[in-house]
Amino acid sequence: VCSRREADQLTDAGRVTVAGKEIGTGERIPADAEVFLDGRPVKAETRQVLLLFYKPRGIVCSTKKQRQETTVTEFLDYPVRVYPVGRLDKDSEGLLLMTNQGDLANEIMHAGNFHEKEYIVTVDQPFNSAFIKKMQEGVELKELEVTTRPCKVKALGKKTFQITLTQGLNRQIRRMCEALGYHVVTLKRVRIMNIHLGRLNTGDYRRVTPQELEELQWQLEQARMEREEEE
């Protein structure tokens, strides 16, 4: 019914009781205790969740605490346990999907599905048409021993471009730029398949709409059918 922060506010206000007794913030209660909020029982709810989250820079896509870094699950503090669908570098920002549905997460991340992911990238120096052409055709990443798939690239300014990938190699865009002599200054993901970041503010999240979910599931089903035909 609420996040942990909100739960603290509710207990501070004396609105949470167990067996008729007000429960204080941080007070331990038995795991099988029946909890009441404003006199009404609170029941555990397992629901399917798919969140659209604007990950800020500096937040890591992990569910486990490492060093002094803040993880996305810590930052979100969502009342239902959710985890990131794929990754977005610590130094990158933008759209990150969070869910508690393992099958859905696996389908979205399936490399063979060629799902589109769109980014806005700014580099440290002006680029030319040759840079755009090479990015589109594919860049050899020697450290990974792979050449990137052809992709869509569009110049938005002297140092800023839009790129749409259908694969998710580790730090792929940064590696592609570095291989061509450029350094990424800012990188923001703005779309995953049919899910757009839109006007969501940094650090905010929302649940996907029924229309977004329906279109997403249709695209996943089409990809699934294409895979089966190829097999």
Image (cartoon, helix red, strand yellow):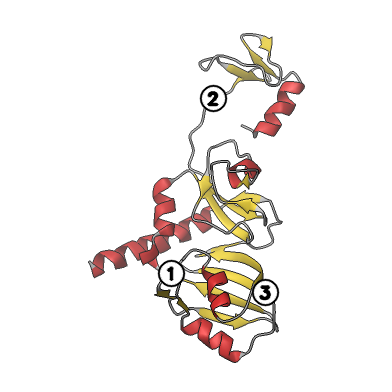
Task: Report the residue at 62% width, 50% height from top.
Answer: 206
Of badges 3 and 2, nearer the viewer stands 3
Of residues 208 and 115, which is closer to you in this image?
Answer: 115
Of badges 3 and 1, nearer the viewer stands 1
Task: Report the residue at 60% width, 51% height from top.
Answer: 60
Instruction: Kindly identify the amino acid type of the residue bearing the numbered disc 1.
Output: Leu
Question: Which numbered dot is residue 43?
Answer: 2
Residue 173: x and y, percent? 55, 71
What is the quadrant of residue 40 in the picture?
A: top right
| SS type, badge 1 | loop
Residue 223: x and y, percent? 36, 65
Structural distance between the alpha carbons of marks 3 and 1? 23 Å
Structural distance between the alpha carbons of marks 2 and 1? 49 Å
Dot 1 alpha-carbon crowd within 10 angstroms: few under 14, some 14 to 19, many 20 or more: few
Q: Earlier in the sequence, mark 3 or mark 2?
A: 2
Dot 2 alpha-carbon crowd within 10 angstroms: few under 14, some 14 to 19, many 20 or more: few
What is the quadrant of residue 10 in the picture?
A: top right
Task: Report the residue at 61% width, 32% height from top.
Answer: 1
Counting the numbered discs, the total is 3
| SS type, badge 3 | strand
In the picture, measured across the screen, residue 42 lies left or right of residue 9, that is: left
Question: Which numbered dot is residue 144?
Answer: 1
Of residues 178 and 134, which is closer to you in this image?
Answer: 178
Instruction: Kindly identify the amino acid type of the residue bearing the numbered disc 3.
Output: Thr
Residue at numbered disc 3: 122
Q: Earlier in the sequence, mark 3 or mark 1?
A: 3
- Does residue 26 lie above or below 158 as drawn? above
Instruction: Kindly identify the amino acid type of the residue bearing the numbered disc 2.
Output: Lys
Q: Quadrant of the C terminus?
A: bottom left
Q: Earlier in the sequence, mark 2 or mark 1?
A: 2
Of residues 96 and 216, which is closer to you in this image?
Answer: 96
